């Protein structure tokens, strides 16, 4: 497994602005850190649950249809290129967020967030399953990715104001670098 590509993919997808991170940032500003942490806990538990479901579903699919792994790798690569393009052209002025901040809204948001759904359905078969198929290894992967997601959410809580100002000030430069790193990860799947 190319650990650098794996970590870049996980880092970029979880740390870059998306619906969950934007809601966390908004919650910090409008309702405070405690409320944002409630939301973060719900989001993290749902994120881990989605990763677990994805790992189980992909394990079954690989057993039944061995060629599905290659298809998921292709989908994963294409999704990375799509995200790279979206990050590159992102316009933060058009974002709107619902300001709830509860544990349940954080939990439910993950099941409605296309970024999270596609990420959880592609990261396991793209990076872990081609190299590790044993349940303990896949489980460690799920926990590692969940931890990365939690750290991303926590970063948005703890540094929300600073991060928001930095992104606004250097938006285009940050987007170009994140898009390039994500495209690199998509290419490295095939190397």
Image: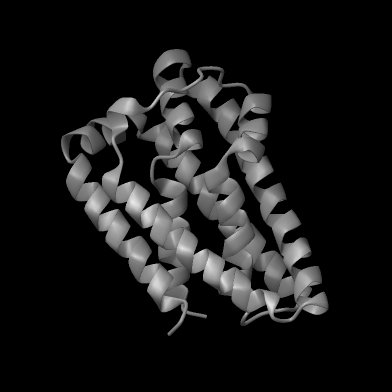
Is 186 on the left-hand or right-hand side of 136? left
Is 168 on the left-hand or right-hand side of 178? left
Residue at 63% of width from left, 36% of height from top?
112
Q: Is residue 49 above or below residue 28?
A: below
Q: Is residue 146 visible?
A: no
Q: Residue furthest top?
A: 30
Q: x, y percentage for residue 91?
A: 28, 35
Q: x, y percentage for residue 77?
A: 47, 68
Residue at 62% of width from left, 66% of height from top?
124
Q: Is residue 167 above or below residue 105?
A: below
Residue at 75% of width from left, 78% of height from top?
134
Closer-to-camera residue (83/116): 83
Q: Is residue 191 visible?
A: yes
Q: Count the marks: how many?
A: 0
Figure quadrant of the C terminus: bottom left
Q: x, y percentage for residue 72?
A: 61, 69
Closer-to-camera residue (51/151): 51
């Amino acid at each position: 497994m190319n650990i650098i590509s794996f970590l870049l993919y996980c880092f970029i997808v979880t740390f870059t602005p998306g619906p969950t991170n934007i809601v966390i940032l908004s919650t910090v500003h409008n309702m405070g850190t405690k409320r944002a942490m409630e939301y973060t806990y719900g989001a993290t538990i749902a994120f881990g649950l989605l990763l677990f479901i994805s790992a189980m579903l992909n394990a079954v699919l690989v057993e039944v249809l061995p060629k599905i792994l290659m298809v998921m790798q292709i989908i994963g690569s294409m999704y990375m290129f799509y995200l790279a393009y979206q990050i590159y052209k992102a316009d933060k002025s058009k974002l709107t967020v619902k300001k709830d901040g509860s544990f349940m809204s954080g939990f439910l948001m993950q099941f409605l967030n296309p970024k999270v759904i596609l990420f959880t359905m592609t990261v396991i078969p793209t990076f872990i399953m081609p190299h590790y198929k044993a349940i303990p290894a896949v489980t460690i992967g799920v926990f590692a990715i969940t931890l990365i997601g939690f750290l991303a959410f926590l970063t948005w809580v703890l540094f929300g104001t600073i991060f928001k100002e930095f992104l606004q000030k250097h938006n285009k430069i940050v987007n170009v670098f994140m898009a390039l790193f994500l495209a690199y990860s998509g290419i490295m799947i095939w190397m």
